[in-house]
Image (cartoon, rainbow, N blue to C red):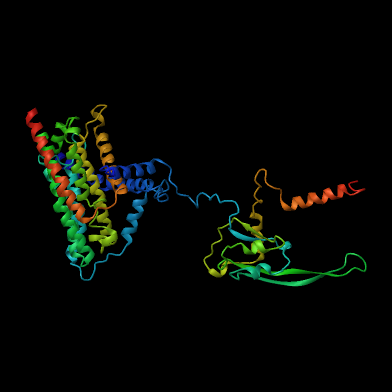
Amino acid sequence: MSARPIFGKGLFQGLIVTWRNLTSRSVTRHYPDVKPELPPRSRGVIALQEENCTSCMLCARECPAWCITINSHKETIPPEIEGGRERSQNVLDQFDIDFSLCMYCSICIEVCPFDALHWSPEFEYAETDIADLTHDKDRLREWLWTVPQPQALDPHAEKAKELIAVEKLFQRSDDAPGGGA
Amino acid sequence: MPDIVDVVLRCLVVLGAFLILPLVVGQMEHKTMAHMQSRVGPMYAGGFHGWAQLIADGVKFIQKEDIVPAAADRTVFKLAPAVALVPYLVAMVAIPLAPGIVGQDLDSGLFFVLAAMSVTVLGLLMGGLASANKYSLLGGMRVAAQLMSYELPFVLSAASVAMAAGTLSLTGIVEAWQPWWLLWQLPGAVVFFVAGLAELQRPPFDMPLADSELVMGPLTEYGGMRFAMFLLAEYAGIVVLAALTTVLFLGGWHGPFGDQFGLLWSLLKIGFVSFLVIWARVAYPRLREDQLNAFAWKALVPIALAQLALTTVVAVMIA
């Protein structure tokens, strides 16, 4: 025999639930008055570190939304020593990201071999005209200053790959005969 | 001459209470309902926690166009909001808040207030029938059905108190009131409060307005100031119901700490009952139309009749 539900239990529970809500703090975020606390690695906007960019076009080609436009020209650098070879370097003319197309997938940032692109947590760049959502390299550079420090590693975590590589290099030069002097 | 000054002054005070108390209750509903749903409600209007929200709403309503549907019965349609609102003003005149603080102390005050409160429903009925809209019409029919069902337990439970006090005068009822009446008249108080909610078409008894079924019931075609008057009537109705419950069942201005706090006790009790009205709205879902009528006839009317019998027996025993 199943237990019969107690008459009026639901009515009582309705009162209890609403009373608990009334006496505890509301969950509303007062956004324009209080800035939100964003999680680390928030994808707000893409920042560009221009001097790291080699105009390799990997990001533009990998972008699923085709929202990155890159134009560059070649400049030659005169040889540093007498009789050396001239070197050539790509210089960015244009680096536009159309944020009306961008879907914040982060592929461009992960594919960049030289860490020229970074996520910034800034998100307040709404515009009244959709055309104004295309931002050029100067605007993307401004956001670079808002990119947070990389997250600290967990305690007892393995050291960063780069650090391990550098330490190995030093160890080798220590072990080498006559080295470390 | 001083008589006229006295009358005018009393009328002005009642009018002031009529304009202010519903807004206070409305603001309380905004904030209480919000917090019961873990929100914060209006926060900007007026600067401090949105205290001027209803004033802002009123300003908005005034600016709106006054629309009357082409097929509507124009006179009845335009008259309906006034018919819904004014009876509460009339009812408020006769409700005492403290000894001497009453618009007009009537010998048959209870009868007068109950009669006035019932007229309000006619306003909604008129709006529903005159709108030339099927949702309004259905809503109006539901208003009528609800009135038929709930007027009876409402009046029966009020009659129980009148019998206990031996008078129809509201002032007389409060003066005859004893604290142990709280227990004696408890079933009657519950029936009176629930039937009052249904009279006001407040959730969970808002089938006539049921927005998921009838758009807005009798109010569907209304906009601007006329709609605002219906809303104001709803909140004025809460105030009148709370005041009447206070006077009949909670002992009006009686309370600890001497008589000089009489008015304060009355207002506190009215605020508390209004809070219960709002709480019921937030906590409970709407009843179905057939459940509503079954509830009135199978639960409220028998309880009210039993209360009446109990009151009679006890009244005869102590007499």
Question: What residue is rendered at 23% in x and 42% in y?
Answer: B242
Q: Which of the pair B46/A144 is nearer the observer?
A: A144
Q: Which of the pair A34/B98 is nearer the observer?
A: A34
Residue B181, image quadrant? top left
Q: Position of residue B304 (x, y in %)?
A: 14, 42
Residue B62, image quadrant? bottom left
Q: Position of residue B137 (x, y in %)?
A: 19, 63
Asked if residue A144 lies left or right of residue A127, the reply is right
Q: Position of residue B144 (x, y in %)?
A: 16, 57
Asked if residue A42 lies left or right of residue B293, the reply is right
Asked if residue A76 lies left or right of residue B312, the reply is right
Is B210 above or below relative to A174? Answer: below
Asked if residue A71 lies left or right of residue B105, the reply is right
Residue A114, image quadrant? bottom right
Residue placed furthest toward the front: A1
Q: Which of the pair A57/B2 is nearer the observer?
A: A57
Q: Which of the pair B140/A156 is nearer the observer?
A: A156
| Figure quadrant of the C terminus of chain B | top left
Would residue B96 be visible to someone looking at this image? Answer: no
Would residue B100 be visible to someone looking at this image? Answer: yes
Q: Position of residue A123 (x, y in %)?
A: 56, 58
Residue placed furthest toward the top: B258
